[in-house]
Image: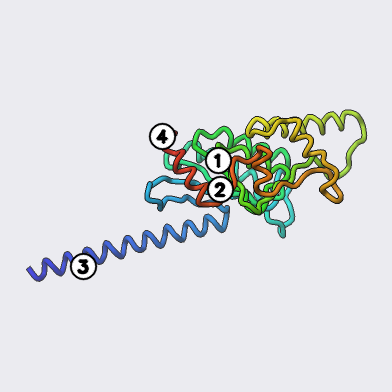
């Protein structure tokens, strides 16, 4: 009898050690994933929902590589991940955190279109700022939040480098601008004339045209759904997930 109890005790100890090792390994993998790509799966909630956390930070990098000193979000990393999320039966919802200065227009719109076409429930949270091409990404989700001190800079398309001063160039600029304004207005409540008015404001930015919206102002203009924080965003996702299952 004594030997049997001793064996069971050792088996339980081994089982506990294996569970601890597995937990440590999972935590290590999560830490590495956060460090490398700024992504992690939130799965320790009481509802057992699996929420994929995606971060859009710094400058959105397009076809050209930016300086190694710059914080960037690489669209060639984000697009395959979004496709994997759509294909996965293990992901119930997606939370997107934004603190971006904008960046490449084509890359930003590609990310926004991918997010908007996901069948999984999606929520975005603007932290710090979501400027320029970050605006379409912020509104591409099913529901959006902005913290009280978060900012959004609304301005026209700008291109760097040599520009040929012919009518075709200006027509091309207008086409790009219409793609952006069309997407934004389709995915939030701001009317197109008002969005264009904010873009062409000349009295706010010292050396540029455009408008800075802070926190509640973005909500009042109809761009963002609600002022809130991380608990609001995660809570909203938990509410939305059962409706999509």
Which of the two labelled residues, at mark 3 and mark 4, occupies the earlier sequence position? 3
Q: Secondary structure at mark 3?
A: helix
Where residue 25 sits, quadrant-wise, is bottom left
Where residue 225 sits, quadrant-wise, is top right
Q: Secondary structure at mark 2?
A: strand
Q: Which residue, given by chain and number where applicable, does mark 2 sit on?
A: 54
Labels 4 and 2 touching (C-beta < 8 A)? no
Q: Please rate how many residues cluster around mark 1, counting C-alpha atoms within 10 Å: few if below 14, some from 14 to 19, many from 20.
A: some
Inter-mark Cα distance, 3 to 4: 42 Å
Q: Which residue, given by chain and number where applicable, does mark 1 sit on?
A: 82
Which of the two labelled residues, at mark 1 and mark 2, occupies the earlier sequence position? 2
- Against 73, is 79 above or below? above
- Against 3, is 51 above or below? above
Q: Nearer the viewer, mark 4 or mark 2?
A: 4
Q: Quadrant of the N terminus?
A: bottom left
In this view, the residue farthest toward the right is: 165
Inter-mark Cα distance, 3 to 1: 45 Å
Q: Which residue, given by chain and number where applicable, does mark 3 sit on?
A: 10
Inter-mark Cα distance, 1 to 2: 9 Å
Which of the two labelled residues, at mark 3 and mark 1, occupies the earlier sequence position? 3
Q: Which residue, given by chain and number where applicable, does mark 4 sit on?
A: 245
For the image shown, how many numbered marks are present on the structure?
4
Q: Residue placed at 90% from the left, 29% from the top?
A: 167
Which of the two labelled residues, at mark 4 and mark 2, occupies the earlier sequence position? 2
Inter-mark Cα distance, 2 to 3: 42 Å
Q: Residue placed at 44% from the left, 60% from the top?
A: 27
List x then y, in percent, for residue 48.
38, 47
Labels 1 and 2 touching (C-beta < 8 A)? yes
List x then y, in percent, for residue 96.
57, 46
Q: Please rate how many residues cluster around mark 4, counting C-alpha atoms within 10 Å: few if below 14, some from 14 to 19, many from 20.
A: few
Q: Nearer the viewer, mark 3 or mark 1?
A: 1
């Amino acid at each position: 009898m004594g030997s049997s109890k001793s064996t069971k005790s050792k088996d339980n100890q081994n089982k506990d050690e294996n569970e601890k090792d597995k937990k440590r390994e999972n935590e290590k993998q999560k830490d590495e994933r956060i460090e490398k790509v700024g992504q992690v799966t939130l799965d320790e909630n009481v509802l057992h929902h699996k929420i994929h956390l995606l971060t859009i930070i710094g400058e959105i990098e397009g076809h050209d590589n930016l300086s190694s000193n710059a914080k960037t979000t690489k669209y060639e990393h984000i697009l395959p991940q979004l496709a994997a999320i759509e294909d996965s039966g293990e992901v119930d919802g997606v939370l997107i955190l934004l603190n971006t200065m904008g960046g490449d227009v084509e890359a930003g719109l590609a990310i926004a279109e991918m997010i908007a076409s996901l069948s999984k429930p999606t929520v975005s949270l603007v932290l710090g700022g979501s400027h320029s091409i970050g605006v379409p990404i912020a509104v591409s989700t099913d529901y959006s939040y902005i913290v009280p001190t978060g900012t959004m800079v609304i301005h026209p398309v700008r291109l760097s480098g040599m520009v040929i001063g012919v009518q075709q160039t200006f027509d091309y600029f207008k086409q790009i601008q219409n793609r952006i304004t069309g997407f934004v207005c389709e995915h939030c409540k701001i009317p197109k004339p008002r969005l264009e008015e904010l873009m062409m404001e000349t009295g706010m930015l010292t050396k540029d045209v455009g408008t800075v919206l802070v926190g509640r102002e973005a909500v009042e203009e109809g761009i963002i759904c609600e002022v809130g924080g991380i608990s609001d965003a995660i809570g909203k996702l938990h509410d939305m997930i059962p409706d999509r299952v």
